[in-house]
Amino acid sequence: MKIPLIWLKDYIQTDKSIKELAADFTQLGLMLDKPLDDTNVMDLEQRLNRSDLLSMIGCARDLAAFEGIKLNLPKGYTKPGHPPSTIDQIQINIQTPVVRRFQTRLIKGIKVGPSPKWIVDRLTGYGMDSINNIVDITNFCMIEYGQPMHAQDIAKLPGHDITIRKAKTGERLTTLLGTEIKLTQDTHILTSGGEPIVILGVVGGKQTGVSDSTKDIILDAGNYDSRVIRRSSRQLKIMNETVSRDDKFLDPRLIDHALARATELILEIAGGTYYENDDYYPSPVVPQTMTLRLSRLQLLSGMDITMTTAKKILKSLEYVIVEEGEGTITVEVPYFRTDIEVEDDLVSDILRINNYLNIPLQALSTPVPTDITSAIYKFEDRLRDLMVAQGAHEHITSSLTAGSGASDQVILVNALTSDQNALRTNLVPGLTHVLSTYKKHKIKTIPVFEIGKVFRVSDNNYLEGRLLTVTSGADSLATLLTSLGITGYHINQKHEILIANSLVGTVSSDTYTLVTDSLMTHVKNYSGIISEFDHSTSLDLSLLCPIKVTYGDIVDSLSSLKGDWIGISCKEVTKLENQINNYLLTFTWTNDSKSVDSDKTLILKTLKDKLDIDSKS
Amino acid sequence: MENEINKLKSQFAADLDAVNSQSELDLLYIKYLGKKGSTIEIMKSLQGLTLQDKKIYGPILNDLKKSQEAQIKEKSIYLRSTIYDLQSDLTIPGHPQPIGRLHPTTTIIREMNEFFIRQGFSIGEGPEIEDVEYNFRRLNLPDGHPATDLQDSLFIEEPNLLLRTHTSSVETRMLSNNKPPMRVVVPGKCYRNETLSITNSAFFYQYQGFVVDKGITMGHLKDTLTKFHQFLFGDDVVLRFRYKYYPEVSPGMGVDMQCRFCGGSGCKICKGRGFIEVLGSGMIHYNTLLACDIDPEVYSGFAFGMGLDRLVMSKYSIADIRKLYGGEIVYK
């Protein structure tokens, strides 16, 4: 919202510089959107909840309260208008629940011409071009009060009615700016004689616009369901001053004030006579009241604010005190404050106007609560340290990826680009890209890893899996598991990593992946340190294996035997001729085992029987 | 033939003399004794000679080859001894060895966690595929609130299932599943329907924190955030606390840090404002506590949330967020 200093000073008297005023607005919640320049205009950020801060008066009111100075408001034309004759009356038909109020007034015998300088100066400061006195006044009042309004040339209305309804597909309308819009059923429109003349809450049509020859106008201001307006503006891709206000939560009572002001200015500047027309307002708003407890104010702020201060501030923001009790006041919420939901919002207003800088710092002093950090968070952090200790580099890559067409991949229904329209199912592609970056920049081969989530959908259940993937081989895996106190693990034919027969991950030729929460259940926290040395006996067996037999097969074939050995490891594999591989395996027994020889016989016999393996030794 | 042999001998002697390192020596070996080396080639050419010549030059060439091999070996030993001499020169700077490294975001998260753990906070986590209930509704964001606009979120199933748009969804989950008192911080990934650019990514990180206990005030919030920023930036940090609206808190509070580049006078970095917005915060909304089954008449709480990426990027001088999470950074 642009605030020209010259306009702001219509409502408040201040000697502060524009820089100081901008600093005050910042404290109030409206920071500068753009840096100040020499134009004497402040460009303040917009706020989603306070529709009144999209008005000059709204901003001036908060500032006056903050500065503790008087706010001067225009009076407007509050006398009733002439009753219209039956012939002149424009029939208003509302055929949609989207409209909460629609007030119309007729002003006849006006003289359209250029606007007076004071209006042009203010509109120009705000960044709006001057069109003619009537259009300028409707714009001026919209910015002054935050209520969009609209003037149309009665002579150009195709019918003697204004009807508000949903558009029909195929209907067209040319906007004031000359753009032709194809309407759909999602848009609401004003029609006259059945023809579209205005897109509700969004933009007026060219056909009925006010021009130099206009003599009689119908002035309207409406209150609509902001969600509907927001939807049509987004759909039509039209964003303007009207939309930015109509898509906020405005109070229907605002219309009275804004139209009174517009009527006053039109009569004063363009002349004419004011006739009343229909005011569609089926369910008038009941003013909202709210009770504030001083104890609540003091609790949330941590300050000893008095009720006197609270009352003074609330009054300056135009709250009306309707009841006072023991440590409580009940106020009527002003019509323009559609943001007030709960008592704490009153606390918020009081602290804001009292300036947050005045809230004293207070150290947390309650007892420290129980630690509820999840075990998996701590474990994954430990995995990071262990991988770093191996010399690996951690990377984080995006979970968003291109859909592969796999049926279990989670697909986003409204992604902006096709290369980011799905969730990743594994971490390998991200890390592969990292490695290609490393290669491009001639960084030596360093293992990289990522710890993160992957996603799948199965029977309409969305599953999040926690993985660690490392671009390194068997030694890195063994190192990691050993440092977690896991010595016995097994890789089966499907290249799955098993610990105590439960699946914890997979290996490929150049990466391995572990499911962190499955892995966590096997971890021994205090291991890997030896103080009592327990010697063991070991025996190397040189085995001649047919080419298709793997180490995994050997271990599998021995797993059901009742031997005494406590460990098997593979020292070396050599490829011999005649489709034979030579595996050199080391078997380990405790020092006191007496069955080394019988175990050896059992092992060799089993391997021969099951896998046709001969012993070389 | 004899001429060629003599030429080869003297060329070899000269080349050997010029060698100063093991790698040069390796090249020399290839030049003479490799598969297509000069000595080997000349030996191959024996085949075209007469039997008599073969008898003369065969043994000579064999000797030459042996002698060259011996000389190379000798030179190698010599080179190693000179390396030893180089090692005794302590003024030569070393070369850094590769080490393991964490991602910059992890490093910053750990730094922040360290501060908050010391203040008695736990670290919270939650799902990334989220329900509208936890992502919006319990945060006092009713259907139709501008902040819940469909196009700003990445949906998996409209209108109820989406990728969490902020870490505040973890706050509502933890408030709903635990009993106060609670002090929790949540570092986490978030997603929005943004077009990719230098500063915007559909995938980003936030750092959230909240405290719920009896008697929690805005003074506690201001104090916690002041200490946190002093921890991150030093004791001379200057913060500005001001009103700001966020739907999930009331009263809401914006926090700005005085620009550390210009000291508040206004520059390019702070866009002339003198201050840089660092985070949003406030007292947890009455309706949020109610929705999470915590009695707001007994407990009060504060919450704060900040984007993490901008901080990571400024600490590590990374200009483009796409590189940070696009696998396009390398660690020296």
Image (tube, coloured by chain):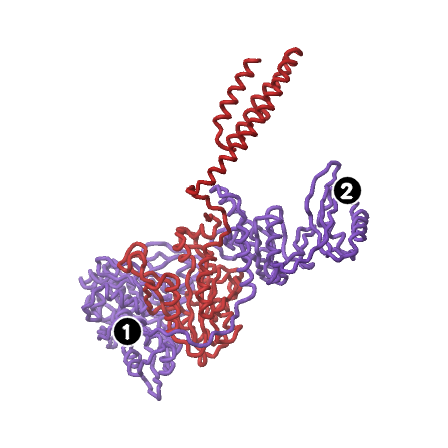
Residue A581 coordinates in the image, percent (x, y): 72, 41
| Front position in the image: B198 or A385 | A385
Residue A488 coordinates in the image, percent (x, y): 67, 56
Badge 1 amino acid: His
Chain A as rendered: colour? purple
| Residue A616, disc | 2
Q: Within 10 angstroms of label 1, few (less than 14), some, or many (20 or more) residues? A: some
Q: Within 10 angstroms of label 2, few (less than 14), some, or many (20 or more) residues? A: few
Left or right of B60, for residue A175: left
Residue B62 coordinates in the image, percent (x, y): 62, 20
Q: State the image quarter where residue A321 is shown.
A: bottom left
Left or right of B26, for residue A223: left
Q: Which chain is red?
A: B
User: Could you tell me if residue B281 is visible in this image?
Assistant: yes
Q: State the image quarter where residue A357 is shown.
A: bottom left
Q: Is residue A283 above or below residue A166?
A: below
The residue lying at 66 percent from left, 58 percent from top is A533
Q: Which residue is mark 1?
A: A257
The disc, 1 or 2, on the residue closer to the chain's N-terminal end is 1
Circle 1 SS class: helix
Q: Is residue A212 above or below residue B40?
A: below
Q: Is residue A335 above or below residue B83?
A: below
Badge 2 amino acid: Lys
What is the chain letter for disc 1? A
Q: Is residue A226 above or below residue A308?
A: above
| Front position in the image: A270 or A553 | A553
The residue lying at 45 percent from left, 52 percent from top is B324
Q: State the image quarter where residue A281 is shown.
A: bottom left
Left or right of A336, for residue B46: right
| Residue B33, disc | none
What is the chain letter for disc 2? A
